[in-house]
Every structure is written in C-alpha cells, then in structure tokens.
Amino acid sequence: MSRAVAALRGALGFCSRVPVGGGEGDWEAFRRAPAAMPAVAYALGGLIALPVVAAALGPVRVPTPTFAAAFPAWIYLVTGITHLDGVADLGDAAVVHGDADRRREVMKDSALGVGGTLALALTVFAVAAAGTVTVDLARLSLVDAVALVVAAEVGAKAATATLVCVGEAPHEGLGSALTGESGPRALGGVALATAPAALFGASALLAGGGAFGTAVSPAATLAAALAVAGVAYAWANARLGGVSGDVLGATNEVARVVGLHAGVIAWTLS
C-alpha cells in the first residue's frame, strides 16, 4: 500500500503543481507505475472543473468570453506549464526540414520558433474554445459538464501513460526515465485506472443527474484522447525515432483538448 501511495504522490508531482511533498522515493515508485497517472487524474479533473461549477452556480452570470480566458489560466495554474514546453518543441520539430537527428536538435534549442509559437497558440486557443462550450453545457446540465472535464483529464493522462508503456525513448532524458521502466504489460493497469471514467455518463443517467442522455460523452472523450496517443506514437517514431519527454508532455496537452471537444460534440449529437 505504501508503494502505491508513493506512486500516486509521484504522479501528482509530475502531472500538477499540487503541493504533495514527497521525494526521490515517490518519483521512483511513479516511474514503475504508469497507471498512477490516470488514477490521480480524477482528482485533478475535479480541481480543473471547479471554475465550471462556480460559473454555473454563481449568483452572477459570468460572460462566456471571460470564462474562456479564465479556463486555460486555471488549468495551467493547477497542472503547470511544463507539458506545454513539449507542445512548443514538437511544433518546432514538425516544421523543420531534415532527419530525426535534426529534429531532435531543434527540440533541444531553447529558442522558440514559428512552429512552436503556432502550436502553443493553437493549443491555448483550443482550450479556451473548449471552455466556452463547457460552461454553456454546465448551465444546462452541471453533472454532464463536470463528467466531461474529469473524463478529459483522465483521458489525457491515460494517453500519456499508454505512450510510456509502449514507447521507446530515442535518447537519455525524461522520456527514457519513464519508458525504460514499463512495458506493454503495464497497459492492463492503465486500462483499469481509466475505465471508470467511461461510466460517468451512465452513472449520471442512473442517478437522474444527466439531463440529456449523455452516457456516450465520457466514452467519446476517452476514445478521442487515446486516438491522440496513437497518432503521437506513430509520428514520434517516424519523425523523431522514438517517444521523448517532449512527446509525452505534448500528448497530455493535445489529448486533453481533443477529448474536451470530442465529448461536447458527442453530447450535442446525443
């Protein structure tokens, strides 16, 4: 039990700015337990959903554009901006000409290029846009909106953990520190930690909380996030020679926003 708790503390320290303390032992336990990422994502998703709850239940109606600006700010306050660095580095690598060695060289450069700037701008804009539709959904069905936000965070962490299990790093660094300790057999634990999020919609319906029959929304959110992992895995292997720490960070950020938008689309169509 103490090892599991240490892994969860390590995962929280890696995935967020939540002050959980811990030390080298927690990091080592986390490196050997990728399932800890989706496991702690339920709590992180609940924290991220707090502004959604406040906007829906507050005595003053917050203008949707104002919430759209506050939503990404709150997400990065909770989770930190470390993973956004991966988005920037992959954006630069995606537009450079050359082989995998050249792309990895560009990713190590601390200067932000046009590709990285565009990737960051698109990611933050997409998060803000997701915030607008999420708060509108919350004003119709708060349970559905919170379930969507939590499922998106679980999906993002499950996508990252999946890459940790199946990927191989092209060089020494954060990527190798994580991928080197796990293999495909660890996917079972990741799946077990992720599966409850797919049931959020059904649980809300059974409880009478889901007002519009949205049992499919969390499942669509998770499916979309995991699809991002598949694309990231294929692209990283083809263009970078493997899954680096930057790939893991970028996958987390992109999977979150893709999951949010996919969930809203599924809710709209249900």
Image: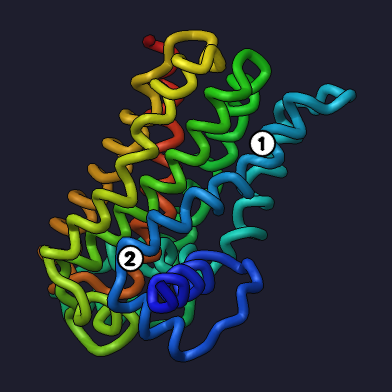
Tell me the residue at 67%/34% (across/down).
52
Q: Earlier in the sequence, mark 2 or mark 1?
A: 1
Residue 248 is marked as: 2
Establish if 121 lies above or below 150: below
Is 29 placed left or right of 49 in the picture?
left
Which quadrant would the N terminus be assigned to in this image? Answer: bottom left
Helix or strand or loop: what does disc 2 sit on?
helix
Residue 2 at x, y = what percent? 44, 77
Tell me the residue at 61%/80% (across/down).
21
Residue 164 at x, y = what percent? 24, 67
Residue 130 at x, y = what percent? 53, 33
Inspect the image, locate mark 2, and give the three-letter code of the amino acid beneath it: Leu
Asked whether residue 112 is in view, the answer is no
Mark nearer the viewer, 2 or 1: 2
Q: Quadrant of residue 107?
A: bottom left
Residue 266 at x, y = what percent? 37, 19
Which quadrant would the C terminus be assigned to in this image? Answer: top left
Inspect the image, locate mark 1, and give the three-letter code of the amino acid beneath it: Ala
Tell me the residue at 54%/10% (across/down).
211
Establish if 69 lies above or below 265: below
Identify residue for label 1: 68
The front one of 117 and 71 is 71
